[in-house]
Amino acid sequence: MAEFRQKVLSYIHKIPKGRVASYGQVAAACGKPRAARAVGGILRGLDAADGNIPWWRVVNNRGIISIKGNWIASKEVQKRMLEKEGIPVSDGYVLEIKKYRINNHAVKD
């Protein structure tokens, strides 16, 4: 699991500003296409030492902010961070996933 966690964090770190990926997309790109919930768990477990990981750039596959939250994250914080990067998010925490989703090939190793 530690290797998968490292792959997930590395992938998310490479998502460019103003773009998003879905939990499932991250899982698939890291070799475990059925591990979307595990990606969410990894992000929920982030702490201050992981502060440079742009966790807010990961949303569900329908473009909805579905974060369960932890001590540093909430739907409101994620919405604010995405809007700061130029991604409009509705009051219902929805964004245009098709417009802002990153192409996996665009994430450089």
Image (cartoon, rainbow, N blue to C red):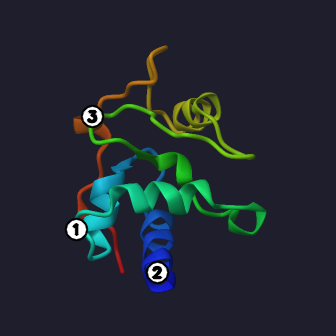
Percent x, y for residue 8? 44, 70
- Look at mark 2 in the image and give the residue it sits on: 1
Q: In the image, which is nearer the foreground, mark 2 or mark 1?
A: 2
Mark 3 or mark 1: whose residue is earlier in sequence: 3
> Residue type at mark 2?
Met
Disc 3 from disc 1: Cα separation: 20 Å
Instruction: Indicate left or right for 56 with 19 as reference.
Output: right
The residue drawn where x is 35% and y is 41% is: 60
> Residue type at mark 3?
Arg
Percent x, y for residue 68? 55, 40
Instruction: Indicate left or right for 23 with 81 as reference.
Output: left
Instruction: Indicate left or right for 52 with 90 as reference.
Output: right
Q: In the image, which is nearer the foreground, mark 3 or mark 1?
A: 3
Q: In the image, which is nearer the foreground, mark 3 or mark 2?
A: 2
Discs 2, 1 touching: Cβ within 8 Å: no
SS for callout 3? loop
- Look at mark 3 in the image and give the residue it sits on: 62
Q: Which of the 4 image quarters holds residue 49? A: bottom right
SS for callout 2? loop
Disc 3 from disc 2: Cα separation: 26 Å
> Residue type at mark 1?
His
The relative height of residue 98 versus residue 10 in the rendered view (above or below) is above
Percent x, y for residue 56? 53, 46
The residue drawn where x is 34% and y is 62% is: 26
SS for callout 1? helix
Percent x, y for residue 38? 42, 62
Instruction: State the mark number for residue 105.
Output: 1
The relative height of residue 59 versus residue 48 in the rendered view (above or below) is above
Discs 3, 2 touching: Cβ within 8 Å: no
Disc 2 from disc 1: Cα separation: 24 Å
Mark 3 or mark 2: whose residue is earlier in sequence: 2
The relative height of residue 77 versus residue 102 in the rendered view (above or below) is above
